[in-house]
């Protein structure tokens, strides 16, 4: 308690600095990954992606990020054993932030799309083992995290595979592909609005004191989907057949229909990312702020000040602007060739998988899901459509994320304990 009283301001300043560093890494890696498919498909430019991210990432973080942020620590470690030594938990949260941030920076420089969720979980595990006790870690929860390395990309891949097949059946392999593209496109855009609304209603808004039943959530999502579908129809109806472009590529005009559709998925992915993944950067920051401001009270949940959500959104956008292009290139162009229709299917599949996971509480990674969805799109063209070297590098980076985060957190924990202790 004496350390909290003596160094409280310094600890909060460190938490803010490390939190910004962490959210910068989230933007450079995770958000860049989410936007990479839109850029790789040629639907948006890098500048447009940044503009979309600024608006919708902030909207997702502030409107729907609070509930997820309060629960990031819940279930991973049990701090009961150190409830009378709150400074230990503060050191652990700071070490976890710094460890995850350093690993995200390394991965982003290399262009590896790793999981920010699993980076911070690995860091928390490392702190829990040395700062509290090995049995303070919920190893069954960690087992579900490891299982999600396989489950979430497989689900995303299956859904994207089926979506691509549906576009071929309904649009590309018909007598009049352009006409059918305009006919069915509003339905696909309806799915975007419907699914992203469900993500928000299921996982967020509780901190805004908006409580909806399952029926109310589905009804609201259907209305939002219908509105999104109508807006999409307004864009799509203006697309005209380009016979010159069709001479070079049979489906050039059809792909033009999917280009404005990808604007909807890009906005949706940025919003969903802000609402779900801002917690990875500011959850430990919120924990430090709560402990210090309460004079040493250790709580599993705490109020989320709006300035912390704003700080998280700022760091994430800054990361995308400064270093995000490397991960964007990996996901958008190096795994497999993407067109607007394929990119749209990958992003819609990723959003659908996030909805499924949100109801189970499985700590899945949007990175794993989206990469799996891109792989599913590539499978519709055969295994030769992949750059297997890039895929193997990505898988290896996933496998080492948890242990690297844990090792770095242990090192930083003992350093901070030595400095303040």
Image (tube, rainbow, N blue to C red):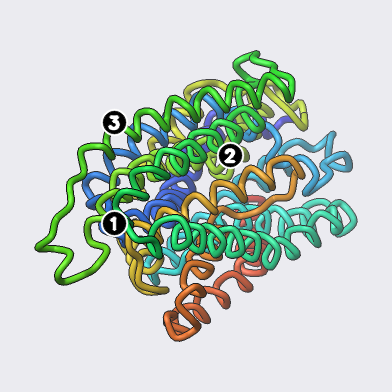
> Would residue 352 be found to the left or right of residue 169 on screen?
right
> Would residue 152 be found to the left or right of residue 343 on screen?
right
Tag 1 and tag 2, C-beta contact below 8 Å: no
Q: Nearer the viewer, residue 11 or 395?
A: 395
x, y percentage for residue 194?
54, 34
Q: Pick out the residue farthest to the top.
A: 209
Q: Which residue is mark 2?
A: 279
The numbered dot on residue 255 is: 1
Q: Nearer the viewer, residue 270 or 411?
A: 270
Residue 308 position (above or below residue 97):
above
Sequence-earlier tag: 2 or 3: 3
Q: Pick out the residue farthest to the front.
A: 175
Q: Pick out the residue farthest to the left.
A: 244
Sequence-earlier tag: 1 or 2: 1
The span from disc 2 to disc 3 (Cα, nearest Å) is 35 Å
> Would residue 307 be found to the left or right of residue 123 on screen?
left
Look at the numbered disc 2 and give the secondary structure of its residue.
helix
Tag 3 and tag 1, C-beta contact below 8 Å: no
Q: Which residue is mark 3?
A: 234
Q: Residue at x 50, y 83 (%)?
A: 383
Look at the numbered disc 3 and give the secondary structure of its residue.
helix
Name which quarter of the figure residue 183 lies in.
top left
The span from disc 3 to disc 1 (Cα, nearest Å) is 17 Å
x, y percentage for residue 143?
81, 62
Q: Nearer the viewer, residue 194 or 410?
A: 194
Q: Residues within 10 Å of mark 1 (few under 14, many from 20)?
A: many
**Can residue 7 be seen by looking at this rendering?**
no
How many discs mark residues in the rendered view? 3
């Amino acid at each position: 308690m004496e350390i909290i009283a003596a160094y409280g301001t310094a600890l909060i300043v460190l938490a803010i600095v490390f939190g910004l560093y962490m959210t910068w890494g989230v933007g450079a890696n995770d958000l860049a990954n989410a936007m990479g498919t839109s850029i790789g498909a040629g639907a948006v430019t890098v500048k447009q992606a940044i503009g979309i991210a600024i608006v919708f990432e902030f909207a997702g973080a502030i409107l729907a990020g609070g509930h997820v942020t309060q629960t990031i620590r819940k279930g991973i470690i049990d701090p009961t054993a150190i409830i009378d030594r709150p400074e230990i938990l503060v050191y652990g949260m700071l070490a976890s932030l710094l460890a995850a941030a350093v690993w995200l920076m390394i991965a982003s420089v290399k262009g590896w799309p790793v999981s920010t969720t699993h980076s911070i979980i690995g860091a928390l595990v490392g702190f829990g083992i040395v700062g509290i006790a090995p049995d303070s870690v919920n190893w069954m929860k960690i087992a579900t995290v490891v299982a999600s390395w396989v489950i979430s990309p497989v689900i995303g891949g299956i859904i994207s595979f089926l979506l691509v097949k549906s576009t071929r059946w309904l649009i590309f392999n018909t007598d009049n592909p352009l006409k059918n593209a305009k006919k069915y496109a509003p339905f696909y855009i309806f799915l975007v609005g419907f699914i992203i609304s469900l993500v928000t209603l299921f996982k967020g808004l509780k901190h805004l004191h908006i409580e909806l039943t399952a029926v109310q959530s589905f009804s609201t999502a259907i209305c939002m989907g219908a509105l999104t579908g109508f807006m999409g129809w307004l864009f799509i109806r203006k697309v005209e057949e380009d016979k010159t472009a069709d001479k070079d590529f049979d489906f050039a005009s059809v792909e033009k229909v999917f280009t404005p559709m990808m604007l909807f998925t890009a906005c949706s992915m940025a919003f969903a990312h802000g609402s779900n993944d801002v917690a990875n950067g500011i959850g430990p920051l919120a924990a430090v702020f709560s402990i210090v401001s309460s004079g040493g009270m250790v709580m599993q949940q705490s109020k989320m000040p709006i300035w912390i959500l704003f700080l998280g959104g700022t760091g994430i956008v800054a990361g995308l602007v400064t270093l995000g292009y490397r991960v964007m290139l990996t996901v958008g162009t190096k795994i497999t060739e993407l067109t607007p229709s394929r990119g749209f299917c990958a992003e819609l599949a990723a959003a659908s998988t996030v909805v499924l996971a949100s109801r189970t509480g499985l700590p899945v990674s949007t990175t794993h899901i989206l990469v799996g969805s891109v792989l599913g799109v590539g499978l519709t063209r055969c295994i030769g459509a992949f750059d297997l070297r890039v895929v193997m590098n990505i898988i290896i980076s996933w496998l080492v994320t948890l242990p690297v985060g844990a090792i770095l957190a242990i090192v930083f924990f003992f350093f901070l304990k030595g400095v303040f202790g």
